[in-house]
Image: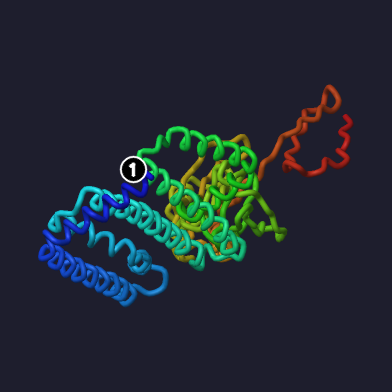
Amino acid sequence: MDAARQFQAMVDESVAWLGDNWLRILIALGAAALIVLLLRAARGWSARLCDRRESGNGWLRIAGATIGRTTNFFIVMAAARLVAGYAALPPLLDRTIGFLFTLAAAFQAAIWAREFILGAIERRTRSDAYHGEALLNAMGLIRLLISCVVFAIALVVVLDNLGVNVTGLVAGLGVGGIAIGLAAQGIFADLFAALAIIFDRPFRRGDNIQFGTSSGTIEEIGLKSTRIRAFSGEERIISNKSLLDKEILNTTRRNHIRVAMPMLISYRTPTAQLEKLPAMVSEIVTEQGATAARSGFGGLRDSAIGFELEVDFPGTDWGAAHAGRDRIVVALLRRFEEDGIEIGLPAQTSYIAGLPEAPAVALRTAKGATNGNLAKHHG
């Protein structure tokens, strides 16, 4: 009975309102229709403009797709809300339009957020550097998770505007989320690690990386794991979370390769030749298309003079760097032979005592060489 009386009261109130404000109502309806047409035209024009100016999965295309998801219900309720004040609506009808507008705005915001977030993720996963069947298949799960989150937030906003105490609901959703997160902790950890790789870009497919004691080339970034082709040929599969927990050295992004080429120079080399040696070595390195980052003496050793040579080869091709190193070694040996510069060898001196009246005999042998039968000295 109360509902029937309320409905009858609303009808009587509406009839009286129509009779007293018919001109205002007509003007408001015309304005609302014009607003709807303008908003629909703006939606279509913005989407087409973004599509024309951006190809592929660029940000403008994502913005255009997001604008294109604007619903007609939201447009109509926005127009109704804009003209409601001019039409002098009855209190009950005004509250109804206000609630419907809140409902439309909350879910429209959820639709926009869902479309933009999914567009941003797809923009990364569809690029050549991160393209992979596993990640594309995972978009279904990602789409479901994002949809649940944004629409749950929209539902809480709507219920709060209805006067419902949402504290218990939010607490329940939080407890449920924690339970699900603990149950699928490993899956979600690797999933979020994959998203971190896509957005943070510590590496991409084709990059050469070093992690821990391993190294290799990135072949595929998947939902749960990343496949790495080791330089020795085998394929290594490591979970995304474990990979990000390590310190990663990306060797692809450097602009040169530095190779250390230490050597030893004999003490029998004349001082005049030693003075010219650093400049001569740098000149030979430059002739081979590389740069001598360090060319100088490294101290006096027990059996030879230490010489430190560090060479920078342009680019990131290790094969080219190794070939350049070989050319430099041959050129150095040829020049040393021409100038009479001896390469020092690690050596040790052994003293063998003969008979008491015989002098000690000193034999110098190269380090690592096999000591043969030593001649015996008799007086």
Q: Amino acid at mark 1?
A: Asn
The residue closer to the viewer here, 238 or 77, is: 77
Residue 378 left/right relative to 324: right
- Residue reaching furthest to the top: 356
- How many circles with numbers are drawn on the protein? 1
Residue 173, horizontal then vertical, whole percent: 51, 39
Residue drawn 55% across the image and 62% down it = 205
Q: Is residue 235 visible?
A: yes
Residue drawn 14% across the image and 68% down it = 26
Residue drawn 23% across the image and 60% down it = 80
Residue placed under numbered mark 1 in the picture: 161
State which quarter of the image contains the C terminus. Answer: top right
The residue closer to the viewer here, 365 or 112, is: 112
**Where is residue 372, by image quadrant?**
top right
Q: Secondary structure at mark 1?
A: helix
**Where is residue 101, by image quadrant?**
bottom left
Residue 247, horizontal then vertical, whole percent: 55, 42
Residue 99, horizontal then vertical, whole percent: 31, 50
Residue 332 drawn above or below residue 50: above
State which quarter of the image contains the N terminus. Answer: top left
The residue closer to the viewer here, 85 or 132, is: 85
Residue 71 drawn above or below residue 170: below
Residue 25 left/right relative to 210: left
Q: Is residue 334 visible?
A: no
Residue 97 left/right relative to 270: left
The residue closer to the viewer here, 286 or 209, is: 209
Residue 234 left/right relative to 187: right
Label 1 CA crowd tier, 10 Å (few <14, some 14–19, many 20+): some
